[in-house]
Image: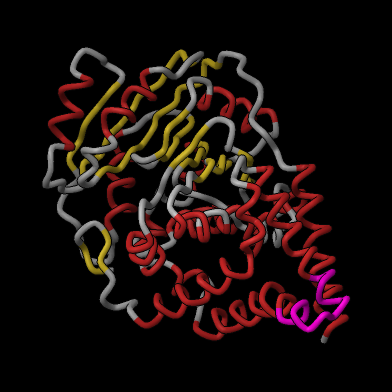
Amino acid sequence: MDSAVFFVNLFLFALTLTNFLLIRKPKDSTPVSVSVDLLIPVRNEEENIPELITALKSQESLEHVRFIFIDDSSTDRTSELIQTKTKDDSRFTLISAAELPSGWLGKPWALSQGFAASSGEILVTLDADVRLKPDALVRSINLLNTRGLDFISPYPRQIAISFGERLIQPLLQWSWLSTVPLFIAERSTRKSLAVANGQFFLVKRSALSRISGFERISHQVIDDIELARALLASGFHGCVVDGSQIASTRMYDSFTAIKSGYGKSLWKAFGSLPGAMTATLFLGFTSIYPLYLTMQFNPLGVLALELIIGTRLLAAVGSHGRIRDAFLHPLSIAVLIYLIGYSFRNRKTVEWKGRVL
């Protein structure tokens, strides 16, 4: 067992280092003439709207761009703020999503309404809490076109302030950076290699149309990963890229919000209960067991712990996160395992944006 955990963690470190060195980064800000439509689903987002619109208005080097807000039955001032702050800018459109039909979840339904109203050659889905740098869109589009891909997901920098956030949020990038060979995933159509983040996602209209828009993910809680899988299954190519220099987001502002957010999705993240149990055992074996061995003064345990913390250090540097939080990795994994159990236990009662999922 001691040598096994060492070699497994050595492999994880080698893979993380390879991804760290090779991951695509949007850099080219050459102006583009292709038509672009941003689809932005919103539901009770009045706190985010002012900053979001300011960031969208600042986007550079795009000849043809539209920003399509889809209001999903907001009960606050979301719609009013959008209308007020965009009334003199013809690039902005606000539509109201139709009543949520049976078999659909809110976000995929809103996106499908935006897709029907769009015409751009490139479509971008963007969450309301994401903040884009002025050249974020043009750099992402140039990377998409230069690499000859059908979709990319520029992973935003995850801002984590409270202790609970700092324990959990860095695991988002770490999870795929340490387990998915991105250099293979970019040219593969294997669904098992799909990595995506719906917070910021670019896809060619031709590809999205071929899979009937968002219909395939109508009921999917983890809609972003499932959208990437649907595209890959249809023969299209794409991958996650490093978006930490062009986009940022603070998903949650407390551990209570983290429980609610992860509670709605973690039970689906591993495909099934056996899948979740396997993932939990793997996480415990690679991240908590080395700490136990280290406390027993086991040399291989010390090395295994250093290697797994090394993967977190690489992820932190690559995503512009807090480096010192990497040393809390065993505690982070323990809390993540708790959240997986919480998600399964409460999967029929968890509410998100006022709806039970």
Identify which residue, 146 or 1, lies in the foreground: 1
As drawn, is 254 to the left or to the right of 189? left
Relative depth, front residue between 18 and 188: 18
Give the image's coloring scheme. Answer: secondary structure
Provide the major secondary structure of the magenta segment.
Answer: helix
Q: Is residue 115 left or right of residue 351?
A: right
242 or 333: which is nearer to us? Answer: 333
- Between residue 163 and residue 255, name the one nearer to us: 163
- Is 252 left or right of 23, judged from the image as shown? left
Give percent across and percent down for residue 193.
66, 60
Image-quadrant location for residue 120 = top left
* Residue lying at 59% horizontally and 44% vertically, measured from the top left: 321
- What percent of the width, then of the height, locates residue 267? 44, 74
Q: Quadrant of residue 116?
A: top left
Using residue 355 as the reference point, say whether residue 217 is left or right of it.
Answer: right
Above/below status of 301 relative to 225: below
- Asked if the stretch drawn in magenta spans residue 299, the answer is yes
**Total count of labels:** 0
| Quadrant of residue 41 within the rendered picture | top left
Say if 269 sits above or below 21 in the image: below
Q: Quadrant of the C terminus?
A: bottom left
Q: Please state, as top left, top right, bottom left or bottom right, where the N terminus lies in the image.
A: bottom right
Give the residue drawn at x 12%, y 43%. 76
Above or below 59: residue 299: below
Q: Position of residue 323 (x, y in %)?
A: 65, 48
Q: Residue at x 21, y 63 (%)?
A: 355
Image coords of residue 344 (percent x, y): 40, 80
The residue located at (76%, 49%) in the rendering is: 19
Reply yes or no: does residue 236 show up in magenta: no
- The residue range painted magenta reads 292-304
